[in-house]
Image (cartoon, grey):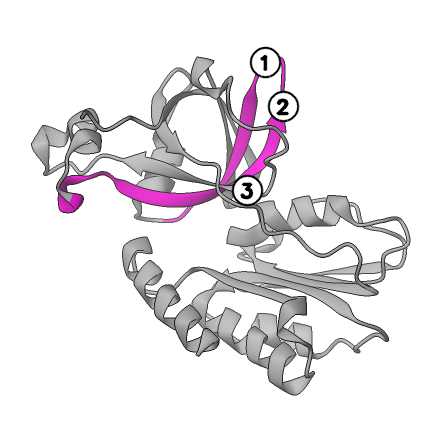
């Protein structure tokens, strides 16, 4: 039986969101049956391996050899619209990497295979207060979470970006505080953690949402779990990438770390 292909979407638009972030708008007929209300859900973008099966992505997609199949890169649905059906995907651009290179060089009319969406991971709106922290890779999902906060929400969001030009206007409730941390990754890995731990803990049971680089995520998770003794069910922590590793290598490391947390 022939392996079914993922959705083939079309690049509709590209715009610069901030100094190091591009927004690609995807659409096309294949998006018509995309589930509704998927903002913050993840999708898998497929990129051809140039040295496999002549670089033909459709042959790679149909291959039963896992090593011959396209490279996958995970991204977040930042915004979704109907009539016409469109999704926005934000890319942190950097040197190297198939997704960043594609985002920099793609043009309207080009096509890309996309799988998903995957499960959304959102803050618990029933909490007494909220703590959201992450880096630029999590900024799309953080933006969705911030937009969900009730008007009387209390708490903090701490967001690490590469430079001041990456700070985005994000509305938050009156009693909710938003902090930006500038880190070009030449200043060490603890700036996000230091900013988070400097903030006072509020009264009540929080909903904590963390997503960033692997080492930073583990340090933040340790702070909320061990130092603050916040119940594990109240903390969502995920790593989106790891310094020096490909997504495939990071996935293996992340799986081992998750299993260790469950043991």
Whichever of labels 3 and 1 marks the residue nearer the N terminus, that label is 3
**Nearest the eye: 161 or 235:** 235
Q: Is residue 90 above or below residue 207?
A: above
Residue hosting label 2? 81
Task: Give how far apart the Cα atoms at labels 1 and 2 are.
Answer: 7 Å
Task: Give how far apart the Cα atoms at labels 2 and 3 are.
Answer: 14 Å
Residue hosting label 3? 41
Q: Residue furthest bottom?
A: 227
Whichever of labels 2 and 3 marks the residue nearer the N terminus, that label is 3
Answer with left or right where residue 118 lies relative to residue 165.
left
In this rendering, does residue 147 appear at all? yes
Residue hosting label 1? 84
Which quarter shows the N terminus?
A: top left
The residue at 75%/45% (across/down) is: 148
Q: Secondary structure at mark 2?
A: strand
Magenta region includes residue 135: no
Which quarter shows the C terminus?
A: bottom left
**Nearest the eye: 193 or 251:** 251
Q: Is residue 8 above or below residue 76?
A: above
Q: Which residues are magenta?
A: 66-94
């Amino acid at each position: 039986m022939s392996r079914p292909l993922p959705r083939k979407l079309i690049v509709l638009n590209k715009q610069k969101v901030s100094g190091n972030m591009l927004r690609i708008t995807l659409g096309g007929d294949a998006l018509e049956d995309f589930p509704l209300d998927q903002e913050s859900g993840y999708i898998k973008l497929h990129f051809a391996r140039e040295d496999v099966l002549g670089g033909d992505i459709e042959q790679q997609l149909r291959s039963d050899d896992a090593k011959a199949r396209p490279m996958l890169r995970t991204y977040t649905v930042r915004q979704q619209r109907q009539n016409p059906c469109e999704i926005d995907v934000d890319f942190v651009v950097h040197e190297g990497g198939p997704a960043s290179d594609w985002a920099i060089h793609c043009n309207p009319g080009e096509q890309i295979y996309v799988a998903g969406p995957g499960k959304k991971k959102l803050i618990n709106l029933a909490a007494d207060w909220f703590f959201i922290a992450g880096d630029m890779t999590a900024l799309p999902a953080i933006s969705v979470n911030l937009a969900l906060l009730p008007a009387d929400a209390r708490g903090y969001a701490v967001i690490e970006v590469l430079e001041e030009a990456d700070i985005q206007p994000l509305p938050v409730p009156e009693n909710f505080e938003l902090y930006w941390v500038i880190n070009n990754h030449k200043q060490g890995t603890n700036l996000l953690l230091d900013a988070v731990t400097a903030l006072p803990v509020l009264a009540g049971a929080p909903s904590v949402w963390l997503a960033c680089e692997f080492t930073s995520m583990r340090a933040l998770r340790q702070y909320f779990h061990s130092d603050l003794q916040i119940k594990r069910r109240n903390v969502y922590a995920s790593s989106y990438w790891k310094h020096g590793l490909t997504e495939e290598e990071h996935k293996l490391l992340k799986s081992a770390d998750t299993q260790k947390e469950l043991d």
